[in-house]
Amino acid sequence: MSTITPQLVSLDEDLGPDSRSVLRALSARFVAQGRATDADALFAAAWKREEQDATGLPGGIAIPHAKSAVVSQASLAFARLKPGVDFGAEDEPSDIVFMIAAPDTAAEEHLAVLSTLARNLMDEDFLAALRAADDADEVVGIVRRAIGEETQGDAVAAPSTGAAPDVAAPAADATPAAAAPAADAEGLRVGGRPARIVAVTACATGIAHTYMAADALSAAAKKSGVELHVEPQGSSGYAALDPAVIAAADAVVFAVDVDVREPQRFAGKPVVRGPVKAGIERPDELLSRAVRAVEDPAAERVAATGAEAEAGEGQGAAESLGARIKRVLLTGVSYMIPFVAGGGLLMALGFLLGGYRISDVASTIAVENALWNLPEGGLLQYLGAVAFAIGNISMSFLVPALAGYIAYALADRPGIAPGFVAGSVAVLTSAGFIGGIVGGVLAGLAALWLGSLSVPRWLRGLMPVVIIPLLGSIFASGLLILFLAAPIAALMNALTDGLNGLAASGLLPLVGVILGLMMCFDLGGPINKVAYAFAVASLGDASGANPVPYYIMAAVMAAGMVPPLMMAFASTVLDRSAFSAPERENGKAAWLLGLSFISEGAIPFAAADPLRVIPASMLGGAVTGFLSTLLLVGSRAPHGGAFVFFAIDPLWGFAIALLAGVLVGGFAIVALKRYARRRQPAAVAS
């Protein structure tokens, strides 16, 4: 199938007064032609990209683009608008609009084709031909020739596999821009010779702006007599610059909206940073700043550690604190998810095979028994114990992995060891995942600072393997133990005493609300553990004459199931477009984690977006806790979730309370995602 067809072309039609209307109309075209399955979801993905950074460019061009699971084939839609529509360009409305739609799993050759189109948009003859085209067929012919598709009768063949590397690793990667002298080259020379600059370009999707910025910088370098080598880091792959070229460079330009891959290659070089659109719209300015930085001893230089906040969220050196925090947290979460999913599912399997009491005996059975020495419960109990024990071990890495890779996001590999240690200390002190986040940040900052120190050559080899892990661990973990353990213990005791007093006074629904809030506040952290420990301890006093402990246990278990279930419901059913592809994948696993009463299944969502996920979770948990105690639902099992249905009475009351909390929490998080959106700061040119 061809990338563009006449049915995806709109010439001089009224598609609406603003960019939202145009994107909705073009999204509907993709669906009508079988290129996508959900116009609303595709529009949401494109608009989310538009909110991050407007796609309008100088010269009346706009190139909105999105990668989404609802797209079935990488495709282009074209609109020539009269009058033009504002897509955020600085000079004028856009009358030439290409909308690029790519699947989440687009093949490299498809992305290469789309990248080729983006590079042609820098060609004035290409744009003039589009503006002069008489009909849709002519537009399709112009675009197909530009992107390398060949028409054979009525069939259109995809470009040869040999075309992809040319786009993924364009000529600018290996060949410097011509260094011919030019009238305006004054000031862009170093030591009487043409300046040598290396540059990296990268945008959020790696399809369009990445390559347009590379071409714009190359054209500006040719005009100004600069010897430039560019490394576009796109979705279709990239060819790393020759280390010898980097070593010979005077300065570095990072025109990026995302992290630079392997930035430590440029360590020590003066660096100028900016969003990728600055590379398209102001390439001369970036190159001039880079040359000035060569002679400026106070200029920023690329740090030796690679993950120390390279160009997050399109802001480069002007990256906002919020954007940097978000990027660091997302790095930790992405490495933590496999531990949550794998470990949680194994624990759920353990409950299913071994019963709700398997958590009490799993470790003993797994160590002391074997297939030829089965426990009293037989094969199923043994297999359930083994599954639960392995899953529990996997889950025990959850907070250390989160902390370790948060530290990695800040300080690269030297931060991993101090981060893992700090995360383990957070578990030891019952500080939970919030303590893990704090410990990871402390460890990363410590490792980053230690790595920036100027030390003798003989000591440099010991820094990443001995000195930084040692001192970073002492700093981060020492702060956690010395200053967090005692306050957490005092808080737990105070909360337990308060809950005992409320339960004794007969205010059971109020206790249910409070327990629901506590279970959903930190998702396995100290507050959550206080509520759960209170419920389990109360079971020892339960009897036919005193069923209140059963009611408390049911409220705690139901409320603890709400966060993962509501996030699974919101991300996989209610509004998939409000969540990233990794979140949607994690949402699938969260269904089973929630049914198993594993609140940690929601941590990947909460760690990435705590200010919206945690309040929505607490609202859902409070509703569930209230209804569970109001309906006098009791549980004789301390764990197991839906897998211990036989120990819950009345089961219908438990189901109603749980469903109500999941629905309330799910709709709340979607509403917050839609209407409590954090505005991205405007790009700042420094």
Image (spheres, rainbow, N blue to C red):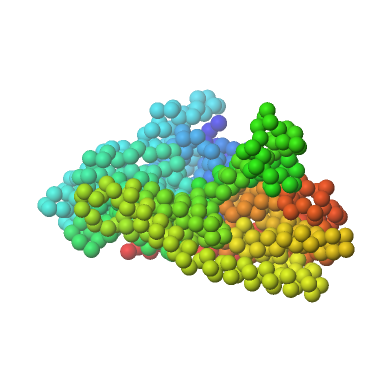
Do we see residue 167 in this rendering?
yes
Left or right of 25? Residue 108 is left
Left or right of 233? Residue 575 is right
Residue at image coords 70%, 51% = 597
- Tell me which corner region of the image, top left, top right, bottom left or bottom right, holds residue 319: bottom left
The quadrant of the rendering that contains the C terminus is bottom left
Q: Nearer the viewer, residue 267 or 63?
A: 267
Residue at image coords 54%, 48% = 397
Left or right of 659? Residue 16 is left
Q: Nearer the viewer, residue 218 or 60?
A: 218
Task: Give residue 408's position: percent from left, percent from top.
Answer: 42, 51
The quadrant of the rendering that contains the N terminus is top right
Do we see residue 387 in this rendering?
no
Q: Nearer the viewer, residue 567 or 350?
A: 350
Task: Give residue 255's position: percent from left, percent from top.
Answer: 35, 53
Eyeballing the image, is 632 above or below 32? below
Task: Give residue 72's position: percent from left, percent from top.
Answer: 59, 38
Extreme residue in the top direction = 153
Q: Nearer the viewer, residue 545 or 22?
A: 545
- Tell me which corner region of the image, top left, top right, bottom left or bottom right, holds residue 242: top left
